[in-house]
């Protein structure tokens, strides 16, 4: 409550989450309902975000597209955080050849630009939601692995870890119950940053036609459609772009707040 940045970010994130969860049920128009008498209609009381080239309500499509985009992005970051953290902890705890092999694999993934790697995976394996989640998760996997490894190296020789070894506890139990809780703060902060990255990446893939496929709406797909007739109906691209911007603003502010709360130096300064 004392961190204003984090509270503002949390409030925006909650509003966005509520909008995409319950908003489509409150809109009288479905995302695929066409009104040929209101093609490219500007924003009005009937259509607050206007309509597109098929007479579809842009607000309804943005809310449902936001739900699709946020679900895919959240699932991708969750997968990346879980797998990446486990890889990093294994690498940092055991060191030796385990560390060498795992980190070289992570370096190989780092060598590819994120968007290029995601595009390649989508072209090779298809355009399903599961493949989008896998592509985004694979992009962000090395970042979580590096963070988990570096923080594990900082605490692996701490007395409470050594005490657990002397008690004869299995390495897996030590990593799960002793190391993971003590490195969760930077992973949580990185997850908030990664969620914003995932939203941008998913929107970019959909914008170029390699993401969520029609008729399912996505924010990137809506922006791509609006680009074709931007001079006649700028509200289609503008409104969908603003929806992405608001979501990113809330997530980034929340991430800044989490960083301030979990960094001892910043917490003491505050």
Image (tube, rainbow, N blue to C red):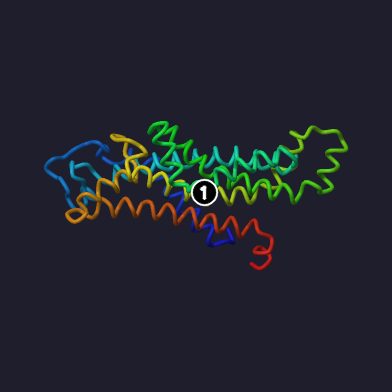
Position of 246 relative to 160 (above/below): below
The foreground one among 154 and 115 is: 115
In this rendering, position of residue 49 left or right of residue 95:
left
Q: Residue furthest bottom?
A: 269
Q: Quadrant of residue 173?
A: top right
Q: Position of residue 101 (x, y in %)?
A: 66, 39
Q: Secondary structure at mark 1?
A: helix
| Residue name at image x 63 percent, y 58 percent | 261
Q: Position of residue 178 (x, y in %)?
A: 75, 41
| Residue name at image x 36 percent, y 39 percent | 210
Q: Quadrant of the C terminus?
A: bottom right
The foreground one among 173 and 141 is: 141
Instruction: Please tell me how many numbered marks the rendered image carries.
Output: 1
The foreground one among 179 and 14 is: 179
Q: Residues within 10 Å of mark 1 (few under 14, many from 20)?
A: many
Q: Residue furthest left?
A: 37
Q: Quadrant of the N terminus?
A: bottom right
Q: Position of residue 259 (x, y in %)?
A: 60, 57
Q: Position of residue 233 (x, y in %)?
A: 19, 53
In this rendering, position of residue 28 left or right of residue 82:
left
Position of 266 relative to 219 (above/below): below
| Residue name at image x 53 percent, y 61 percent | 5
In this rendering, position of residue 93 left or right of residue 7:
right
Residue placed under numbered mark 1 in the picture: 194
């Amino acid at each position: 409550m004392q961190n204003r940045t984090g509270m503002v970010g949390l409030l925006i994130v909650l509003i966005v989450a509520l909008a995409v969860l319950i908003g489509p049920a409150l809109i009288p128009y479905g995302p695929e309902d066409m009104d040929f008498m209101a093609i490219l209609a500007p924003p009005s009381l009937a259509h607050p975000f206007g309509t597109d080239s098929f007479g579809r309500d842009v607000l309804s499509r943005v809310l449902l597209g936001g739900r699709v985009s946020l679900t895919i992005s959240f699932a991708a970051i969750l997968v990346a955080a879980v797998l990446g953290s486990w890889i990093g902890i294994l690498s940092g705890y055991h060191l030796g050849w385990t560390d060498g092999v795992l980190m070289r694999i992570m370096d190989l993934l780092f060598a590819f630009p994120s968007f290029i790697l995601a595009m390649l995976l989508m072209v090779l394996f298809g355009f399903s939601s599961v493949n989008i989640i896998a592509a985004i998760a694979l992009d962000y996997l090395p970042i979580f692995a590096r963070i988990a490894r570096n923080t594990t190296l900082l605490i692996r020789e701490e007395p409470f870890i050594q005490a657990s070894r002397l008690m004869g506890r299995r390495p897996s139990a030590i990593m799960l119950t002793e190391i993971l809780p003590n490195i969760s703060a930077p992973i949580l902060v990185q997850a908030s940053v990664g969620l914003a990255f995932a939203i941008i990446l998913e929107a970019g893939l959909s914008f170029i036609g390699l993401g969520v496929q029609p008729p399912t709406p996505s924010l990137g797909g809506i922006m791509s459609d609006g680009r074709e007739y931007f001079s006649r109906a700028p509200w289609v691209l503008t409104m969908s772009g603003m929806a992405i911007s608001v979501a990113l603003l809330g997530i980034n502010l929340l991430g800044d707040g989490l960083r301030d709360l979990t960094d001892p130096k910043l917490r003491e300064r505050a």
